Amino acid sequence: MTSPQRKIAQPNDAQFARIAEFVLDRDLAVPEAALRHCATLLIDTLGVAAGATVLDVGRIARDHAAEFHAAGSEASAATMLFDGRRVSIPGAAWALATQIDNLDGHDGYMPTKGHIGCAVVPALFAFAQHYPDLTGPQALTALAMAYEISACAGIALHATVSDYHTSGAWNALGVAALGCRLKGADAGMLRHALGIAEYHGPRSQMMREIDNPTMLHDGSGMGAMVGAKAALLAMRGFTGAPAITAEAEEAAEYWQDLTTQWTVALNYIKPYPCCRWAHAAIDAVRQLMLSDGVRADNVASIEVHTFDEAARLFAGLPETTTQAQYSMNFVIATMLKHGHIAPGHIEGAGLNDPDIAALIPKVKAMPVDHHNARFPAGRWSDVEVVLTDGRRLNSGDVTARGGPDAWMSDTEVEEKFHVFCSGVLSDARSRAIWAMRDRLLDPSSRFTDLASLIQQPGDAI
C-alpha cells in the first residue's frame, strides 16, 4: 500500500499577505540608491534591445508577434519597441524579451543564476503604454518591485528543486506582479496571477541550452509572455493554484528580506554581449593584455581555470550568434584580437574571422574546486597564458566586472550603451535615451517621454 503524496502549494495567508502588501503598496518607498541603479539598469537594457533589433532572432520574434499575437482592441494593444507595430500586450513583452535575451548583454543577479531585466523591462513598457500619466519615479518603483519579486522567486526555485531552470521559470512572477500593480489588481487577483505565472512558466533546463546553444536562450521571452498573460487572466477571473515558490513553507526563508534588502541595487551590468559565465575569464585575459602586453600574435596557449558551468561553454568555432554567446574560446579570442567585445563581433562577418579561428584551439577551459565553491554567489576564474617567447603569465583570481565585486563606472556603462546602439540609432537619439536615466528620477517626468523615443524603428533599419 502506497502512502499518500504530501500536499503541495497549500495557501499560506500570512506569507502571501506580506508579498501582496509589497507588490500593491501605492506608497512603496524604494531607497534612492536602489531607484537610481534601477534607472541605470532600465536604460542599459534598452541599449541591448536596440542592438538586438538587427539580429535574425529579433526580426523573427517581432514578425511572429505581429502575425500571431495581434491585439483585439486598442485597449489590449502595445507597440513593439524599435519596431512601431501594434500587437497584444503579452506579444509585445514576448517579442522584446526574446530579442534582448538573444543579444545576451543584459543585467543579472548572481544568486538567481539568471536575469530579471530582460523580462520585466519589456513588460513595463507593454503595460505602461496605457497609463500616460505614469511618472518616471512611479515607473521605476514598479520596476524595482518586479526585480525584487523575481529575485525572491528565482532564489526560492533554485533552492527547492534539483534541476537548473532558465530565468523565464521565475521572472514570470515578477512580470505578473508588475502587471497587477500597474493595472490596479487586488490581493486576490495577484495571488491567482502569481499562481498562473508559476504554473505555466517555462521550467526549461538551462544546461540543455548551454550544451546545445539555440535561440531558446534563457527562456525570458516565454517568461515575459506568461507573466503578462497571467496578470491579464487573473484580472478577468481566471484562477491559479498558489505559487509554490511564494507560498510553500520551504520557500518562506527566501522572502524574509523582501522589504529590507533591495536586491535590484546588486544587479550586475554586463560589459560584453555573451554569457556571464565567460566574463571573468575574459576580464582575466583583458587584465594581462593591459598589464603585460599580451596580444593575439604573441599567445601560444591559454588555460582557463573556472567553475563547472563555465567550463561547459562552447569551445569550437561558432556558426551562429547563439553559439558565439554561449562560448568560452571564441569570446576570449575576440578579446585578444579587438581588446573589447561588441555586438558586431558575435554576428555576421564576426563569426568568420580567420584570425579568431586560429586563436580558438589555443584556449582550453577546465573546472577547479575553488571557483566551483564560489558559484553562484560569484563568477570567478583565472588564466595562465604561455607566450610565444616561453614566458608564463598568471592573472590570479579575477571576478567578472560590472557587479558588486567590481562595478563599472557610469562612464563605462554609458560607453557600453552607445556601442550597443551604434549602427541602429542615431547619435542624437541614443544620447536622448541615455539622458532619460536621470530625468526619470524627477517626480515631474513622464514615463511616456522615454517611451516616445523607443517605439519607432531604428534609424538605420
Image (tube, rainbow, N blue to C red):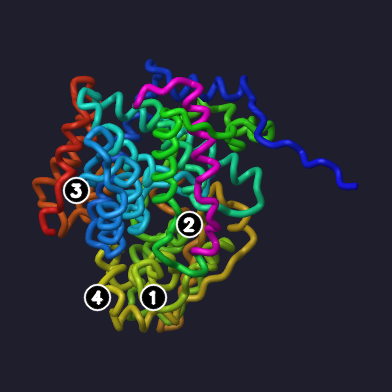
User: Crowdedness of circle 3 by 10 Å Cα count: few (<14), some, many (20+)?
Assistant: some
CB-based contact (under 8 Å), mark 1 and mark 3: no
- Magenta-colored span: 183-209
Q: Which mark is residue 130?
A: none
| Residue type at tag 1 | Pro
Q: Nearer the viewer, mark 1 or mark 2?
A: 1
Task: Decide which of tag 1 and tag 2 comes sooner along the chain.
Answer: 1
Vertical side of 225 occupied by 29: above or below: above
Compute the Cα span from label 3 to label 2. Answer: 44 Å
Residue assigned mark 3: 85
| Residue type at tag 3 | Arg
Task: Decide which of tag 1 and tag 3 comes sooner along the chain.
Answer: 3
Q: Secondary structure at mark 4?
A: helix
Is residue 86 visible from the viewing direction of this image?
yes
Q: Position of residue 414 (x, y in %)?
A: 23, 46
Nearest the viewer among 23 and 35 is 23
| Residue type at tag 4 | Ala
| Residue type at tag 2 | Val
Nearest the viewer among 110 and 170 is 170
Residue assigned mark 1: 318
Q: Nearer the viewer, mark 2 or mark 4?
A: 4
Q: Is residue 155 left or right of residue 4?
A: left
Magenta stretch: includes residue 8: no
Q: Which mark is residue 349?
A: 4
Vertical side of 252 occupied by 416: above or below: below
Q: Position of residue 456 (x, y in %)?
A: 14, 47
